[in-house]
Image: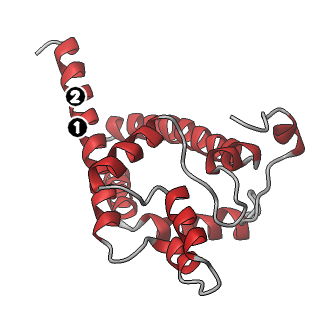
């Protein structure tokens, strides 16, 4: 198989997998009884009139048959229209961008990806030169152990080590810097 064929096969597999995840997420929420999540508490408010209740149902796209809702769901995913925030009554995509959370997420994701590639490559080179040694056994055992632990548990351990013990990073409540916020558009 050529490289081009391999890449084409992987791209097709990725598209099928993403579509399967989209369908599965939609089916899970459609199979839930009643209205979904926080909207249930909004609609359960006895002070809402029938007109207000119907307006909320239409606002959150819960009208029509499931096929129409699925098509709307996929279209909204592809156009980054994630609905309205219950708390702020603003579009979620606008809140993601204007709050600075997107900047923090991309900074964290980019830094961790680069660090994991560099550290993993360097450790792989070192271990491959000493195959079968105690260092090799230690690294393989350590990587299998950390890989098998749940992500949230590893996150807690890393926060404890790097934030609370070494004080290299803040343990939480990071807010975007003023520099990042001043360079972001207020809407999409």
**Is 141 left or right of 161, judged from the image as shown?**
left
Residue name at image x 56 percent, y 65 percent: 56
Q: Which residue is mark 2?
A: 12
- The answer to whether one can see residue 101 in this image is yes
Q: Is residue 24 above or below residue 104?
A: below
Q: Is residue 83 above or below residue 181?
A: below
**Is 28 left or right of 104, judged from the image as shown?**
left
Q: Which residue is mark 1?
A: 16
- Tell me where residue 25 sits by quadrant: bottom left
Residue name at image x 44 percent, y 70 percent: 36
Residue at the far bottom: name it. Answer: 46
Q: What percent of the width, then of the height, locates residue 41?
A: 55, 80
| Residue in the foreground of this view, choosing between 45 and 161 | 45
Q: Mark 1 and 2 residues: CB-CB less than 8 Å, in contact?
A: yes
Alpha carbons under labels 1 and 2: distance apart: 6 Å
Q: Quadrant of the C terminus?
A: top right
Residue name at image x 52 percent, y 66 percent: 54
- The answer to whether one can see residue 131 in this image is no
| Residue in the foreground of this view, choosing between 151 and 18 | 18
Q: Secondary structure at mark 2?
A: helix
Few, some or many residues within 10 Å of mark 1 (<14, 14–19, 20+) = few
Q: Which mark is residue 109?
A: none
Few, some or many residues within 10 Å of mark 2 (<14, 14–19, 20+) = few
Q: Secondary structure at mark 1?
A: helix
How many numbered circles are shown?
A: 2
**Is 79 left or right of 149, judged from the image as shown?**
right
Q: What percent of the width, then of the height, locates residue 130?
A: 33, 40
Q: What percent of the width, then of the height, locates residue 113?
A: 53, 39
């Amino acid at each position: 198989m050529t490289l081009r064929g391999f890449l084409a096969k992987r791209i097709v597999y990725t598209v099928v997998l993403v579509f399967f995840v989209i369908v599965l997420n939609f089916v899970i929420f459609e199979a839930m009884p009643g209205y979904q999540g926080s909207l249930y508490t909004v609609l359960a408010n006895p002070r809402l009139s029938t007109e207000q209740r119907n307006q909320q149902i239409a606002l959150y796209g819960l009208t029509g048959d499931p096929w129409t809702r699925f098509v709307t769901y996929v279209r909204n995913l592809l156009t980054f229209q994630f609905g309205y925030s219950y708390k702020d009554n603003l579009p979620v995509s606008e809140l993601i961008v204007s709050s600075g959370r997107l900047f923090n997420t991309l900074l964290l994701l980019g830094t961790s990806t680069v660090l994991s590639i560099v550290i993993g490559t360097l450790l792989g080179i070192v271990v491959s030169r000493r195959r079968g040694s105690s260092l090799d056994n230690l690294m393989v055992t350590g990587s299998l152990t950390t890989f098998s632990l749940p992500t949230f548990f590893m996150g807690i351990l890393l926060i404890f080590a790097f934030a609370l013990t070494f004080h290299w990073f803040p343990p939480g409540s990071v807010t975007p810097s003023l520099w990042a916020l001043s360079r972001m558009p207020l809407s999409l």
